[in-house]
Amino acid sequence: MIIRTAESIFDSLVDQIVAGRMKPGEPLVEQALAEQFGVSRTPVREALHRLEQASLAERGARRAFVVRRMKASDLAELFEAVGEVESVLAALAAHRMTEIERRHMLAILEEGKTCGEDAERYGLINARFHAALKTGARNAALASVLEELNLRTQAWRAANFHVDASRLSTSRAEHDAIAQAIMAQDAEAARGLMRSHVAASYIVLADILSRRGA
Amino acid sequence: MIIRTAESIFDSLVDQIVAGRMKPGEPLVEQALAEQFGVSRTPVREALHRLEQASLAERGARRAFVVRRMKASDLAELFEAVGEVESVLAALAAHRMTEIERRHMLAILEEGKTCGEDAERYGLINARFHAALKTGARNAALASVLEELNLRTQAWRAANFHVDASRLSTSRAEHDAIAQAIMAQDAEAARGLMRSHVAASYIVLADILSRRGA
DNA sequence: TATCTTGTTTATGTATACATGTCCCCACAA
DNA sequence: TTGTGGGGACATGTATACATAAACAAGATA
């Protein structure tokens, strides 16, 4: 990828952080990044500020930016927030999805069953399922909020990619249950199921992290 | 206020937009604002980008920034989002507030009853009540999300300040009901009551706006 | 008359130089 | 030994000049 604009620099940095190639605490110095990307400090500077607002970077020593460090409790709060917002979207989608959207949602899940144990491919299907709910909820403000929160969680999801893999069949079953509730237009059931779904994936992730720490 | 830094420029612009002194569609030109504030374009530029991220500004003609225009449907979505997030916070707070926090919350509401018809003073009490729930929910991620959403609604709240006034006694009763649910640790009741509470204030606001439009 | 081209205007985007601020470290004195 | 003050390094903050992109208008051409 050729880097020219501030936005592409932002995207590139997000990629590197989310993919775990830049680790928490690692310094993000304007001058160094500017030379690395072959541009001046100005666009790099803008990218770093956007990173800070996305909670992917924070101020470290000497006011310099560093890749954001997160405590375990921060991660727990973040996943709780994602779970709650996704739950709301699921509940709204239960009432608001059109017939076409419902069928589309079911088709996505069917496709997910053809993935077998291919975790990477299933991950894409998973994303499409959640995207379908986001659209079906008919609320751009909540959708943007969720995207912002997800940006933060992805740093962990990527670093601990095998969470999805270990939960693959469980996750499929949970998705089916959520879809069923939505088809029945049972908003409260959809909400509760989605909350459990997100919480379950968090628990696996937290377990992996704590084993590493131990 | 003396304007020197990018952050204070941002704050100043937020104030002017939120207070309705800058109206939707009004252009925000870097050069003009720089001269007005007595600084160079650089800090103004940074402030404008932050405004865009806060959804208070958007791109208009000639790629220039303008104060964000909102359609009625956007406003409805926004209030729905606020209502849902506040509901979640209320539900979490029902389980998590300490005894001290609960007493503090009740004290705030008692103080609200001494305001009489002083809408401005009651507005402050109102803010403190919602802030107490935000703290009591013990989730910084959700709290920051709510703050961001509220930043957007305030542009309307300020312009239509008398919404609070017209609903003063009703609002008090709703707050009492929410507090009661929280004291009883009834999360689902708190959630539902809070949702209605926000929806009710939106309905009044929308009514005022549609009368103006008519 | 319609449209395509091109110049001008107006705004943002980027590069570079300089200003400011913070933290570290070490000298030096109580 | 410890506390304190100043110099220097390093990183961000700001000012200014130049580059670029998009929209509008005027004029040439079919």
Image: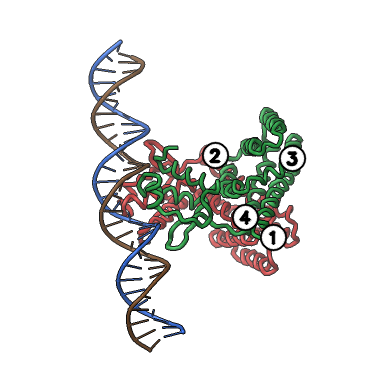
Chain colours: A green, B red, C brown, D blue
Where B126 falls versus A186 (above or below)?
below
Output the chain of dot 3: A
Quarter of the rendering containing residue B207: top right
Look at label 2 and name its amino acid: Ala
Query: Crowding at label 4, few (<14), some or many (≥20) Cα neighbours within 10 Å?
Result: some
Residue at mark 4: A75
Estimate the spatial distance between the alpha carbons at disc 4 and disc 3, rounded to whole Å. 24 Å
Look at label 3 and name its amino acid: Ser
Residue at 40%, 48% (x, y): give it.
Answer: A44
Residue B13, given in percent of the width and then of the height, sits at 42, 52
Residue A196, given in percent of the width and then of the height, sits at 73, 48
SS of the residue at dot 2?
A: helix
N-terminal label among 2 and 1: 2
Residue at mark 1: B179
Residue B72: image tag = 2
SS of the residue at dot 4?
A: helix
Estimate the spatial distance between the alpha carbons at disc 2 and disc 3, rounded to whole Å. 43 Å
Residue at 64%, 35% (x, y): give it.
Answer: A121
Residue at mark 3: A169
Circles 3 and 1 on the same subunit: no
Of residues B97 and B174, which is closer to you in this image? B97
